[in-house]
Amino acid sequence: AQSVSQHNHHVILSEAASLELGCNYSYGGTVNLFWYVQYPGQHLQLLLKYFSGDPLVKGIKGFEAEFIKSKFSFNLRKPSVQWSDTAEYFCAVYPGSARQLTFGSGTQLTVLP
Amino acid sequence: DTGVSQNPRHKITKRGQNVTFRCDPISEHNRLYWYRQTLGQGPEFLTYFQNEAQLEKSRLLSDRFSAERPKGSFSTLEIQRTEQGDSAMYLCASSSPGQGGLRTEAFFGQGTRLTVV
């Protein structure tokens, strides 16, 4: 079965530190990739998406992600985090022709002021 | 607010009771999804509608679960004879068809948190 792995369950950083959250998927065909963020008490919101083209994708709030097909990875990065980035981050994949998203288990990011 | 709307936001029910949740998708979106999320996990797919047709159901959707989207607009998810294991956040999402019917990103509602006591 297709799966999405987020190996970091909880990441704690100080403000201004750089962030990289890992995401790996297990599907060899065409994929569409997403990062969603869930701020405390709010709904899931799209940070960025990859469908095709440039594998370096820029999203909202200074986030970016790089699709590396050979590594089956779509890691999320931000050069300098802020306290307001404290949230849970989910990687998600449309594998192949699937109609539904498959999500990772999420990474809780805590940014200390 | 033109986002995905879900009601109620919270539901506490006794084991064995039936519950029904409602989802109003973004108006121009013809695709609607239900997911379930438990603590420490990402959302898990339950079922998918395109217009009024239910095109896919997860094996997670037992016989006690039923979903409808009668006019291709709002959707309901009913759980009969609730069990404690049904306690979770139930999320609804919608999306529009991309060019040529391609997939596009899903927009999520705030969810209905179900607690079965």
Image: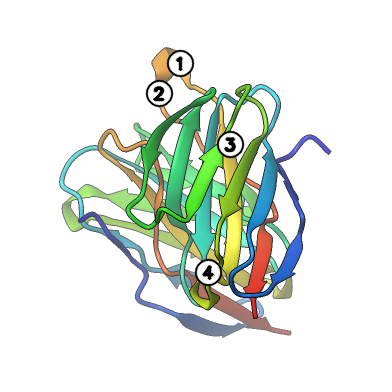
- Work out whether disc 4 and disc 1 sit on a shared chain: yes
Instruction: Tell me the quadrant of the picture where the N terminus of chain A can be found.
Output: bottom left
Question: Whole-percent x and y of residue A12?
Answer: 56, 85
For label 1, count other residues whose C-alpha is less than 10 Å away and answer few (under 14), some (14-19) or many (20+): few
**Where residue B102 is drawn, which disc sits there?**
2
Residue A70 in sight? yes
Q: Is residue B15 left or right of residue A33?
A: right
Residue B70 occupies which quadrant of the picture? top right
Residue bearing mark 1: B99
Q: Do tag 1 and tag 3 residues touch (Cβ < 8 Å)? A: no
Three-letter amino acid code at the position of disc 3: Ser
**Of the residues tagged 4 and 2, which is closer to the observer?**
4
Q: Chain of mark 3?
A: B
Residue at 27% across, 59% down: A3
Q: Give the quarter of the figure containing the C terminus of chain A.
A: bottom right
Cβ–Cβ below 8 Å for labels 1 and 2?
yes
> Which badge, 1 or 3, comes first in the chain's sequence?
3
- Separation (CA) of disc 4 from disc 1: 37 Å
- Mark 4 and 1 residues: CB-CB less than 8 Å, in contact? no
B71 or A50, which is in the foreground? B71
| Residue bearing the label numbered 4 | B86
Q: Which residue is mark 3?
A: B94
Which is more toward the observer, A70 or B116?
B116
Q: Quadrant of residue B76?
A: top right
